[in-house]
Image (cartoon, helix red, strand yellow):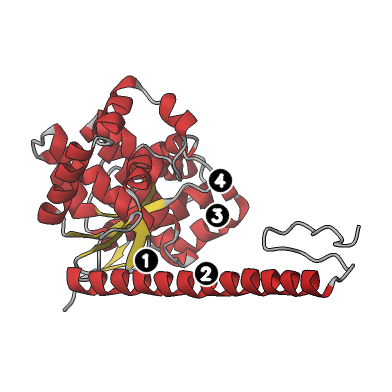
């Protein structure tokens, strides 16, 4: 059976933090991505309430949700199944489920917490990772204030990010990861894109588009990285590493910018055909435009000459766009 892709989406403004601190940066990116993924998980209220009771009976940790249900029991609002802990034989079928759903309809704050926990439970199952629900909730609230409005998103492979976080990596390897994610943010869901390296560097710095003023305001360490890879030698070294280690595909041949893709979306020969075809199409379009413009100028010039020979007093327009003087004045 084909496994479900384990990807989350996160804003690019987390990318520069990875350059400054690999572990903290990846944690922020993944935790925010997991929370965002969870909020899109579909749920049924009854399933969420059942999972909340299961969490109460089976979890030994003191969590927000367990504390909330404990308070309900102490206040006498919810009865605890002290004998069977919600189980009926091998099935978890708590008799207090309907009562909890009733309480949720009256207590929206509790309802939101139960739903949030259940969506995180679904995310944990889908992404096949374990995490602290309370930490994810807290981090999402904290990091949400740092996300720029309409920030481009990047799709991140969760196992890859965790593996990269745990391994010892050089600064150049970290730069490769961040530039790879920057390229993915430019690609989005497209098979290929035409861009330039300045755009890639800007995305690495958390910018939607290149902005010289924002670059000048970068922390000194980020500014040093931006300047270093603006240099042709280091830029080409990075591009080579991306092609060899990250399956990125680049193509440029006497053209402005470069065409870019990822190997599992498009092979180099396919990208080259598209790039050369577009370059040829652009040349043909420019040639057609130049011919049309040349024809317009030639006809205007011929008409002006004819008017002058006939002694016309009607002013005309020459090729330069200026009126000719009346010849008989």
* Mark 4, residue position: 109
* Mark 3, residue position: 104
- Are the residues at dot 3 and dot 2 in contact (C-beta closer than 8 Å)? no
* Mark 2, residue position: 290
Mark 1–mark 4 Cα distance, whole angstroms, equals 37 Å
Q: Is residue 133 visible?
A: no
Residue at 56%, 54% in the rendered image: 103
Comparing labels 3 and 4, the label whose residue is closer to the camera: 4
The one nearer the camera, 33 or 91, is 33
Is 249 on the left-hand or right-hand side of 194? left
Q: Point out the tag, 3 or 1, that comes first from the N-terminus.
A: 3
Residue 130 vertical placement versus 213 (above, below): below
User: Helix, strand or loop at disc 4?
Assistant: helix
Question: How crowded is the residue under tag 1: few (<14 C-alpha within 10 Å), some, or many (20+)?
Answer: few
Residue at 28%, 56% in the rendered image: 124
Residue at 68%, 73% in the rendered image: 302
Residue at 14%, 43% in the rendered image: 237
The one nearer the camera, 11 or 230, is 230
Q: Is residue 193 visible?
A: yes
Instruction: Say which quadrant the C terminus sits in.
Output: bottom right
Q: Point out the tag, 1 or 4, that comes first from the N-terminus.
A: 4
Comparing labels 4 and 2, the label whose residue is closer to the camera: 2
| x and y percentages locating residue 246 in the rendered image | 15, 55
Mark 3–mark 4 Cα distance, whole angstroms, equals 8 Å
Question: How crowded is the residue under tag 2: few (<14 C-alpha within 10 Å), some, or many (20+)?
Answer: few
Mark 3–mark 2 Cα distance, whole angstroms, equals 71 Å
Mark 3–mark 1 Cα distance, whole angstroms, equals 39 Å
* Mark 1, residue position: 189
The one nearer the camera, 189 or 48, is 189
Q: Point out the tag, 3 or 4, that comes first from the N-terminus.
A: 3
The one nearer the camera, 258 or 25, is 258
User: Helix, strand or loop at disc 1?
Assistant: loop
């Amino acid at each position: 059976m084909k496994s479900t892709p384990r990807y989350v989406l996160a804003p690019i403004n987390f990318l520069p933090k990875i350059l400054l601190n690999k572990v903290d940066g990846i944690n922020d990116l993944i935790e925010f991505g997991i929370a965002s993924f969870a909020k899109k998980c579909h749920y049924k209220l009854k399933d969420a309430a059942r999972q909340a009771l299961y969490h109460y009976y089976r979890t030994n940790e003191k969590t927000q949700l367990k504390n909330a249900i404990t308070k309900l029991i102490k206040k006498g609002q919810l009865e605890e199944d002290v004998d069977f802990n919600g189980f009926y034989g091998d099935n978890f079928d708590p008799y207090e489920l309907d009562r909890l759903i009733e309480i949720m309809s009256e207590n929206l704050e509790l309802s939101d917490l139960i739903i949030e926990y259940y969506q995180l439970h679904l995310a944990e199952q889908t992404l096949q990772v374990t995490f602290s629900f309370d930490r994810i909730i807290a981090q999402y609230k904290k990091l949400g204030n740092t996300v720029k409005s309409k920030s481009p998103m990047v799709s991140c492979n969760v196992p890859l990010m965790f593996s990269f976080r745990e391994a010892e990596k050089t600064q150049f390897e970290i730069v490769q990861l961040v530039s790879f994610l920057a390229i993915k943010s430019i690609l989005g869901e497209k098979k290929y894109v035409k861009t330039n390296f300045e755009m890639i560097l800007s995305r690495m710095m958390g910018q939607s588009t290149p902005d010289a003023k924002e670059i000048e305001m970068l922390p000194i360490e980020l500014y040093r990285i931006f300047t270093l890879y603006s240099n042709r030698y280091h830029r080409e070294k990075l591009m080579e590493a991306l092609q060899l280690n990250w399956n990125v595909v680049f193509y440029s041949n006497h053209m402005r910018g470069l065409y870019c893709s990822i190997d599992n979306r498009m092979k180099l020969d396919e990208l080259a055909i598209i790039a050369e075809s577009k370059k040829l199409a652009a040349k043909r379009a420019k040639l057609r435009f130049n011919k049309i413009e040349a024809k317009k100028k030639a006809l205007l010039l011929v008409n002006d000459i004819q008017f002058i020979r006939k002694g016309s007093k009607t002013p005309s327009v020459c090729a330069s766009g200026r009126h000719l003087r009346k010849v008989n004045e």
